[in-house]
Amino acid sequence: MSTRIAVLVSGGGTNLQALIDARGKVLKSGEIVLVVSNVPGAYALERAKKAGIATETVVKKELGSQQAFEEKLMQVLDENKIDIIILAGFMTILTERFTSHYPKRILNVHPSLIPSFCGAGFYGLRVHQAVLDYGVKVTGATVHFVNEIPDGGEIIAQKAVEVLPGDTPETLQRRVMEQAEWILLPQAAEKVCSELKFIGRIGK
Ligand code: GAR
């Protein structure tokens, strides 16, 4: 039986698309069965629907607190018997209450070479702006396990990408996505899913 994957998103969902496009190719040991957004109307939800994947929207503001938000997320994930959670542009921090429930079962893609340009406040275009402000000549992407430390879990895969003269945060983001994130995330997901087959599923 294949590993059941939930992908958590907040925005455009190009990393989700990379996972969808990898189905049956790079991603063979896991099945994307659910996409959860914390932002109503996120374009990633459209991508999921087009691919025939079930969607849920869980909004912190509507639930009133971080605790209620995380409890609802856990309920949805448990109801769908999710084995692996992939954060693909999921722009909210999860506390230990949530992360400790899924040790080595949550993956995140981050658009820099951790431990550079990561942690609280470093997300999306802000990461690439910080890279340009510092003047580093090489950046990249990292896929890592998620624990209670923001961007602090064990690294699964990394890929370097050149910063070019004249780059803007937008051009750099695009290059990091094309040359690193969209390749690395499906590969890392496959690695974790295939290894999980031998370890067993949550609660079993
Ligand atoms: C991606 O670059 C992802 O690495 C980044 O947000 C973008 C989401 O794009 N995530 C973070 O910064 C998390 N700290 P997408 O919605 O098109 O996949």
Image (cartoon, rainbow, N blue to C red):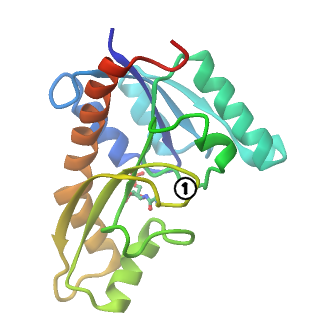
Quadrant of the image occupied by residue 24: top left
In this rendering, is residue 198 above or below 170? above
In this rendering, is residue 100 above or below 83? below
- Secondary structure beneath dot 1 equals loop
| Depth check, front residue: 199 or 106 | 199
| Depth check, front residue: 136 or 203 | 203
Most extreme residue toward the top is 1
Q: Is residue 30 left or right of residue 124?
A: left
In this rendering, is residue 70 above or below 66? above
Residue at x 51%, y 12% (from the top left corner): 204
Most extreme residue toward the right is 64
Residue at x 26%, y 21% (from the top left corner): 29
Most extreme residue toward the front is 199
| Figure quadrant of the N terminus | top left
Q: Write down the residue under mark 1.
A: 91
Residue at mark 1: C-beta within 8 A of ligand 1: yes
In this rendering, is residue 1 above or below 29? above
Residue type of the residue flagged with mark 1: Met
Residue 186 image offset from top left, x and y in percent? 25, 39
Residue 146 image offset from top left, x and y in percent? 48, 49
Total labels drawn: 1
Q: Is residue 29 left or right of residue 196?
A: left
Quadrant of the image occupied by residue 107: top left
Are there few (<14), some (14-19), or many (20+) residues within 10 Å of tag 1? some
Where in the image, quadrant-wise, is ligand 1 located? bottom left
Residue 142 image offset from top left, x and y in percent? 31, 58
Quadrant of the image occupied by residue 93: bottom right
| Depth check, front residue: 77 or 151 | 151
Residue at x 35%, y 67% (from the top left corner): 114
Residue at x 41%, y 82% (from the top left corner): 130
Q: Is residue 20 left or right of residue 153?
A: left
